[in-house]
Amino acid sequence: MTGFICDGNDGARVEVLYVREATMPDRYAAMQPVLQAWLLNADAAFNDGAARQGQSRHLRFLTEKVGDGCGAVVKHVVVPKDSLKDFDPSVDAVRALGYDRNDRKYLMITESTEVCGMAEYSHDDSPGPDNASNTGTSYLRVDATAGCLGANAIAHEMGHALGAVQDSAPHADDGHCTQSLDMMCHDDKTPTPDCPEWDSKRLPDCAGDDYFNVAPPAGSYLATHWNLARSRFFHTSDTPSNVDYPRPGFTYTVTNVASGAALDIDPANGSTNDRKRYLSAAPANSASATQKWLIGYDTGIQLMNNDSLLCLDSANRSQKPGTRSYQEECAAEDGQRWAYLPHTDGSYSILNWLTGLALTQDRPDSSLMKQQVYTGAASQRWRVERIADPAPLGGSGTYHLAALSSRDAVSAPTNSLPGAVVTHSPRSTATSQHWRLTARGQYWQLKLASTSLCVSNNRTTTVGGELTLRPCAITGTDQQWTMTRIADGRYQLVNRLSGLALAMTDGDLSALQQQPSDAKNRAQIFALTLD
């Protein structure tokens, strides 16, 4: 295991406490691998945020040597009955046990399910080192609540403890922000986010103007007010030190260190596009679409198969060692969230949030994939290698476009004529699903490949208006679409004339519509696949 800056306990530190009442489950030992992964992944979020401007910021965890690597110190703390009923009693309980140093931020990971996450937050926007968020003792807490405990909540509550978001910030909203997407913003506040890409949700301050900026412009808000990037609870450097960790929004192949086999979908007894198809290990094949994995993000890292558009899930919600993994409709569930634990050889162990178990190829000569108790063995280590975007804009071929909400493809009626409605149907090889993208300056036309017809909104700004096919016109703004990148091969299409977004509909063969833009709505996010 590697990734932490292993320099002991001097100076300001983040100290991690695993906290439980005596009657609560004791998962201290079992949780260590996934907890270390969560801490590293939370640290990587801040550090990747700093790397956007060529610097580094690593959380100053209390650390210790672990084998040939390094880990965060996690203290096992048992508190009196009812101490975890609420935030304040939990703070009082750990303080009474001596966790009260004035150079500490105490991160409590608890076995309670009373809350999701909470943190002490100081209303002080003064820019200097004596800022209240930068001095004295403070506490933050993340509970073992379903859908909560993980790297995302740890980073979010750490943001509060470090002083985000001050009420005076340009996009402040009661300790959070409205700009979106980033780790401190409310998803429901801004349907048209300034930073729509999936990776932005993981990172601090998408526009660098509210609470985190390592190099704020002179005279700007963060140059003259409290800026988390100046916190003494970070290791700071003017040069980037971010390892190329797997990141949401990019496409990867994943191969086992022991066998060289690649993560794939078992093709037996059905289609690799079917739900609940098991994960398997197969001979690595760079041409295989089912061996390409897009890293998504929904309050945690997800692995989306680039062919099926389904997400890797812990089978049947089982938490027992030996549990298999299969692909399922993507959802905000812990069984579909994964954490990575880096090793000194550049490989990673991949651990499930729900089970805490490591993705394992039990035997090099077997395609069987299971989740097992973490040991760090080669059978649990994976080469996660980024590949080029499989569906870049402007390709010379034709594209399929499938909505992430239904996985249906954008389609046209057979032998389409001008005025035909644009519909959807299950993905197939039919020419009615083949489209060409033609650049018109900064916009794009979507042309049915077998015709000279383009997708149009009929020159209307009506919400819910049906989309139809019209003769392609170079200057027709009703046929021009802004393609906003969400991730590799994933785009939102917004019409130039109406400002409304292309949206998938629910009914069989129903016409696609234009709807108010919401870059978080999966019915408005389309996967492009080059034919």
Image: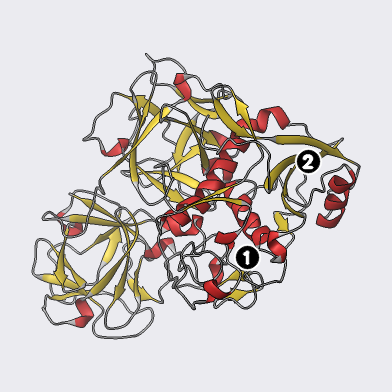
Q: Nearer the viewer, residue 321 or 297?
A: 297
Q: Earlier in the sequence, mark 2 or mark 1?
A: 2
Judge by depth and name the residue closer to the eye, 170 or 148. 170
What amino acid type should be assigned to the residue bearing mark 2? Val
Q: What residue sits right under mark 1 in the picture?
A: 164
Q: Is residue 506 visible?
A: no
Colour scheme shown: secondary structure
Spot occupied by residue 47 in the image (x, y as percentages of width and height): 49, 51
Q: Residues under labels 2 and 1: Cα distance?
A: 25 Å
Residue to which mark 2 is pinned: 19
Q: Element type at marker 2? A: strand
The residue closer to the viewer here, 266 or 388, is 388
The numbered mark at residue 328 is none
Where, by quadrant of the figure, is residue 211 drawn? bottom right
Vertical arrangement, residue 416 with respect to residue 10, above or below: below
Question: Marks 2 and 1: which is nearer the front?
Answer: 1
- Please report the residue visible at 62 percent of the width from the left and 65 percent of the height from the top: 164
Residue drawn 43% across the image and 45% down it: 242
Residue 30 lies left or right of residue 293; in this view the side is right
Given contact means CB atoms under 8 Å apart, are the residues at marks 2 and 1 in contact? no
Q: Amino acid at mark 1?
A: Ala
**Residue sitting at 56 percent across and 35 percent down?**
316
User: Taking 331 as reference, is 265 left or right?
Assistant: left
Judging depth in this view, the residue of 266 and 151 nearest the camera is 151
x, y percent for residue 334:
58, 44
Q: Secondary structure at mark 1?
A: loop
Residue 357 placement: quadrant: top right
Judge from the rendering whether residue 392 lies leftward or rightward of residue 344; answer left or right.
left
Residue 347 spot, x, y in % from top left: 42, 30
